[in-house]
Image (spheres, grey):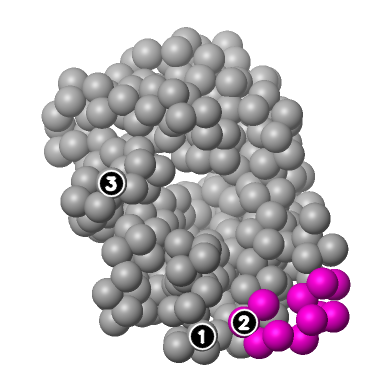
């Protein structure tokens, strides 16, 4: 429906409709893993943003489009390899939601910041935003933001060593989404839970959940997490048994291939690091050096620190 919606908006030439219309193709393309074109669509929508007009359209949509545009612009920026820009854009989304005093948009912005920070491996800050999102969602009865926030609060508890409560909360998050019948946000919560299971040594269960996620993404055309799921599968296979090295290598190479197709430099960096750490040959080392050199920002991020440290070790 995205092309039809865009054409209708242009034919009507109404400022409010033109402002809101790019959200449909932009968000759809994000979830399908077309981060570059998604960014173009979302930036177009945000360039048309008008605060007073958005207050009117939010009565119909439930969300302030200035906030939602910036959240997904930030996610696109991170996937495409611009983590510093992503942090700044997502913070701007939170600031705008707070300025507007619009609870649904505040829940939207804080839970999406928690999600992005989890992806960036800034787990402590992710936990802080998730707790705020959970408080807002409980106060205002926003079930989707609540169930997403529960997963990222759970990972914060896990980080603090409260493994039992963390797993219980993550399980509740998954069960709540399944009860709702929501498919769009399933990969978020399964991803978090499967990582916990693997760290606890429940690797078989972690792999089962991961395979479920991959199957879900195949059926739903949600391509945004697929490269990282293959990388994670490689890690889980290695945790299961050193005899799985060949399978893990296939998973890492698949992750790199998909990330390159999507221009998802952040995911390519991760997968290239995992592959180079495993095979330790010239080809994988050169690949990692090449993708690391591509980045112009984010040099203090965890993935970049790991990549550079591994390169120093391999070249030493």
Instruction: Residue at 43%, 35% (x, y): give it.
Output: 189
SS state under label 3: loop
Name the residue beneath numbered marker 3: 141
Give the CA distance from mark 2 to mark 1: 6 Å
Mark seen at residue 16: 2
CB under 8 Å between discs 2 and 1: yes
Q: Is residue 190 left or right of residue 131?
A: right
Residue 219 rendering spot, x and y as whole percentages: 73, 29
Give the CA distance from mark 1 to mark 3: 26 Å
Towards the viewer: 135 or 155: 135
Camera sees residue 265: no
Mark seen at residue 93: none
Which stretch did the figure color magenta?
7-17
Residue 105 counted in the magenta span = no
Instruction: Residue at 77%, 86% (x, y): give it.
Output: 13
Q: Main secondary structure of the magenta part?
A: helix
CB under 8 Å between discs 2 and 3: no
Residue 259 rendering spot, x and y as whole percentages: 69, 50
Badge 2 local density, few (<14 within 10 Å), some, or many (20+)? some
Residue 122 rendering spot, x and y as whole percentages: 32, 55
Give the CA distance from mark 2 to mark 3: 28 Å
The quadrant of the rendering that contains the N terminus is bottom right
Towards the viewer: 302 or 99: 99
Residue 15 counted in the magenta span = yes
SS state under label 1: helix
Disc on the earlier residue, 2 or 3: 2
SS state under label 2: helix
Above or below, comparing residue 150 to residue 16 in the picture: above
- Based on the displayed image, in which of its 4 quarters is residue 84 positioned? bottom left
Name the residue beneath numbered marker 1: 53
Above or below, comparing residue 203 to residue 214 in the picture: above
- Based on the displayed image, in which of its 4 quarters is residue 174 positioned? top left
């Amino acid at each position: 429906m995205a092309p039809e919606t865009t054409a209708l908006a242009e034919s009507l030439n109404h400022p409010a409709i033109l402002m809101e219309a790019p959200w449909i193709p932009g968000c759809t393309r994000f979830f399908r893993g077309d981060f570059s074109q998604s960014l173009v669509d979302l930036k177009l929508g945000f360039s048309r943003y008008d605060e007073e007009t958005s207050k009117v359209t939010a009565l119909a949509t439930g969300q302030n489009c200035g906030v939602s545009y910036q959240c997904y612009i930030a996610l696109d920026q991170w996937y495409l390899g611009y983590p510093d820009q992503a942090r700044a854009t997502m913070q701007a989304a939170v600031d705008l939601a707070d300025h507007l005093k619009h609870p649904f948009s505040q829940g939207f912005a804080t839970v999406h910041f928690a999600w992005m920070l989890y992806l960036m491996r800034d787990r402590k800050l992710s936990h802080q935003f998730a707790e705020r999102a959970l408080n807002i969602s409980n106060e205002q009865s926003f079930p989707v933001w609540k169930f997403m926030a529960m997963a990222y609060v759970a990972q914060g508890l896990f980080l603090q060593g409260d493994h039992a409560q963390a797993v219980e909360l993550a399980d509740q998050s998954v069960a709540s989404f399944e009860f709702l019948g929501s498919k769009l946000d399933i990969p978020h919560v399964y991803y978090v839970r499967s990582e916990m299971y693997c760290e606890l040594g429940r690797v078989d269960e972690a792999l089962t959940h991961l395979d479920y996620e991959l199957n879900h993404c195949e059926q739903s055309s949600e391509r945004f997490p697929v490269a990282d799921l293959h990388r994670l599968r490689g890690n889980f296979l290695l945790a299961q048994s050193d005899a799985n090295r060949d399978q893990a290598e296939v998973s890492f190479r698949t992750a790199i291939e998909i990330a390159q197709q999507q221009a998802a430099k952040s995911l390519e960096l991760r997968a290239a690091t995992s592959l180079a750490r495993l095979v330790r040959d010239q080809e994988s080392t050169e690949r990692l050096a090449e993708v690391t050199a591509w980045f112009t920002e984010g040099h203090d991020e965890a993935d970049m620190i790991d990549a550079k440290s591994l390169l120093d070790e391999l070249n030493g």
